[in-house]
Amino acid sequence: MAAAAAAPTRVEVLSLFRSLLRTARQFSDYNIREYTRRRAADAFRENRALPDAPAAAAAFAEGKKQLEVAKRQAVVYSLYAPKAKSIMEMKLQ
């Protein structure tokens, strides 16, 4: 149980953040992609200054769970995503 209470290293936290951003890029829909990116940034900003190692470890574990959920959703969404682009993705001519 001691390993669970150890705070994640800076490298581990940044790796998790980058993984969340990479997963967000896999969504074809602009709104879902931006929501996922924004939610990841907000969560990391919110947990930036956690007071102790157990709280940081718990937040890191929750982030890893959310990454797995996002990965599953990206796969499912890719199977059923609409083919039409969002107005935000259309280029002006």
Image: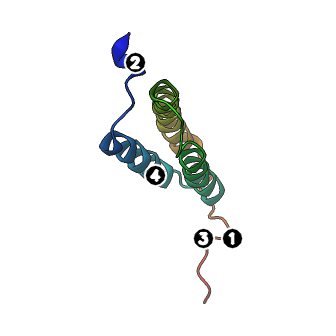
Q: Are marks 2 and 3 in contact (CB under 8 Å)?
A: no
Q: CA distance from mark 2 to mark 1?
A: 45 Å
**Amino acid type of disc 3?**
Glu
Q: Earlier in the sequence, mark 2 or mark 1?
A: 2
Which residue does the numbered mark 4 point to in the structure image? Answer: 21
Frontmost of labels 2 and 3 is: 2
Mark 2 or mark 3: name the one nearer the start of the chain: 2
Amino acid type of the residue tagged 4 in the rendering: Leu
Which residue in the protein does label 3 denote?
A: 89
The amino acid type of the residue labelled 2 equals: Ala
Q: How many other residues sit within 10 Å of disc 4, few (<14), some (14-19) or many (≥20)?
A: many
Q: Position of residue 15 (x, y in %)?
A: 34, 45
For marks 3 and 4 on the same chain, the one whose residue lies earlier in the sequence: 4
Give the numbered dot on residue 87: 1
**CB-based contact (under 8 Å), mark 2 and mark 1:** no
Gap between marks 3 and 4 measured at Cα = 18 Å
Mark 2 vs mark 3, CA separation in Å: 42 Å
Percent across and percent down for residue 85 are 62, 64
Estimate the x, y position of residue 90 in percent, counting from the top left.
61, 75
Give the secondary structure at mark 2. helix
In the image, which disc is placed on residue 4?
2
| In-front residue for pair 28/21 | 21
Seen at 65% across and 70% down, the residue is 88
Asked if disc 1 and disc 3 are in contact, CB closer than 8 Å, the reply is yes
Q: Decide which of tag 4 and tag 2 comes sooner along the chain.
A: 2
| Mark 1 and mark 4: Cα distance apart in space | 22 Å
Up-down relation of residue 49 to residue 58 (above or below)? below
Mark 1 is on which residue type? Ile
Q: State the residue at coordinates (56%, 42%).
A: 47
